[in-house]
Amino acid sequence: MSGAPAPAGPTDADWAAAVAAVRGLHPDARVLLICHVNPDGDALGSMLGFALGLRRLGVRHLQATFPGPAGVPEPFRWLPGVELLVPQDDANPAPDLVICFDAASESRLGDLADRLGGAGTSLVLDHHASNTGFGDVNLVDPHAAATSVVALGLLDRLGVPLDADTATGLYVALTTDTGSFRFEATTPAVHEMAARLLATGIRPGDISRRVFDTRPFGAVRLFGEVLGRATLEPAAAAGHGLVWTYATRDDLVRHDQPAYVLEALIDSVRCTAEADVSCVVKQSGDAEWAVSLRSKGAVDVSRVAVGLGGGGHRFAAGFTGRGPLDDVIGSIRAALTPALLTAPPA
């Protein structure tokens, strides 16, 4: 693996190498698609949408997977191509081609990272500026609003025409990572891509209802409890403000909810008017926490996350915290220093 820093965007040579890696597959080649642990809409949508494109291209031996428990979050279980998913333990141990989606580093692939060493070629599709360049061929575009932008770029270069099933996954990826086209990453090119996807006949209202507007009552009660313990620190982040809350495994058990329901909680926290930086800390182990960070633009939260062992973008990032909750919050608070993190407002 190269281990080189991610470039400003894929070069013509990068695109050509990626096309050659796919076009050069022999008829019986084994292809394994992997996205990051605790997959979100961009990870699953990009991976499954691209998988369906490969199938249209004639790739026969195809698997898609992600590290950790095999269950797909409820908002994405209906996605076309979900039948291609296999548990991580059933994933081919020595594929001819591995394609990784939305993972900024090998660590995000968990126990599946070993598939990179056994692959004939590893191809990385991503849009995180913190990407470590861990693939043989890296299509990493930090300016892309979602990994699905990169995935569609490669499908176009492979000559795969869009159909509704492929477009559905790519649209879910695009709309989740742009916050339903509300975030700063929403550019004219994003709307142009959305128009292409919608032209296949997919129904954005149905997709939005399934992905964003459907939640079990237990999750509603859980959100109310966790939001009730939110803390506002107006002086934090050099006066830009920090708002944070946390959820424990006991909270999930008490409300009989799976962990993935907490992924949407950050949206209810980030709307706090008095804080530029928002944070949700979710317990994932005895002394382990999955931390989600968001910024409205005055603070580059990717620099916080990278400094604490994670990654992401200026407006959205995350890392894994270890130790007592107070220590994790303290590390975030300490990292929000004006000398390192204050950026010009967007």
Image: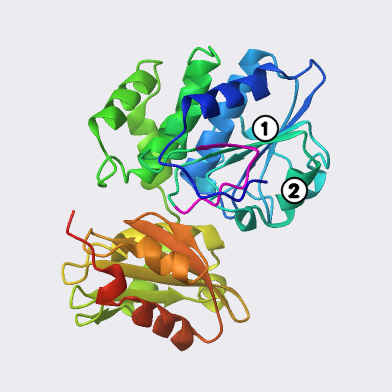
Element under disc 1: helix
* Residue name at image x 48 percent, y 16 percent: 162
Q: Is 248 left, or right, of 27 in this rendering?
A: left
Q: Residues within 10 Å of mark 2 (few under 14, many from 20)?
A: some
Q: Residues within 10 Å of mark 1 (few under 14, many from 20)?
A: few
Report the side of 80 relative to 34 (left or right).
left
Would you say the residues marked 1 and 2 are in contact, meaning their CB atoms lie under 8 Å apart? no
Task: Judge by depth and name the residue closer to the eye, 9 or 175.
Answer: 9
Task: Please state which amino acid type lies under the numbered disc 1.
Answer: Glu
Residue 72 image offset from top left, x and y in percent: 60, 47
In reply to whether residue 138 is colored magenta, the answer given is yes
Q: Residue 279's image quarter? A: bottom left
Task: Give the residue displayed 52% in from the left and 44% down from the top.
Answer: 102
Q: Which mark is residue 203?
A: none
Query: 326 and 19: which one is in front?
Result: 19
Identify the residue at image location x=25%, y=75%.
338
Magenta span: chief secondary structure: loop
The colour scheme of the drawn protein is rainbow
Q: Amino acid at mark 2?
A: Gln
The picture places residue 100, in percent across and down from the top left corner, at 61, 40
Q: For mark 1, what is the residue?
A: 83
Q: Is residue 335 magenta?
A: no
Q: Is residue 101 left or right of residue 145?
A: right
Can residue 222 be seen in this snapshot?
no
Q: Give the residues drawn in magenta, as a range.
A: 130-139
The percent coordinates of residue 326 (x first, y second) are: 44, 87
Task: Determine which residue is flagged by label 2.
Answer: 88
**Residue 117 visible (yes or no):** yes
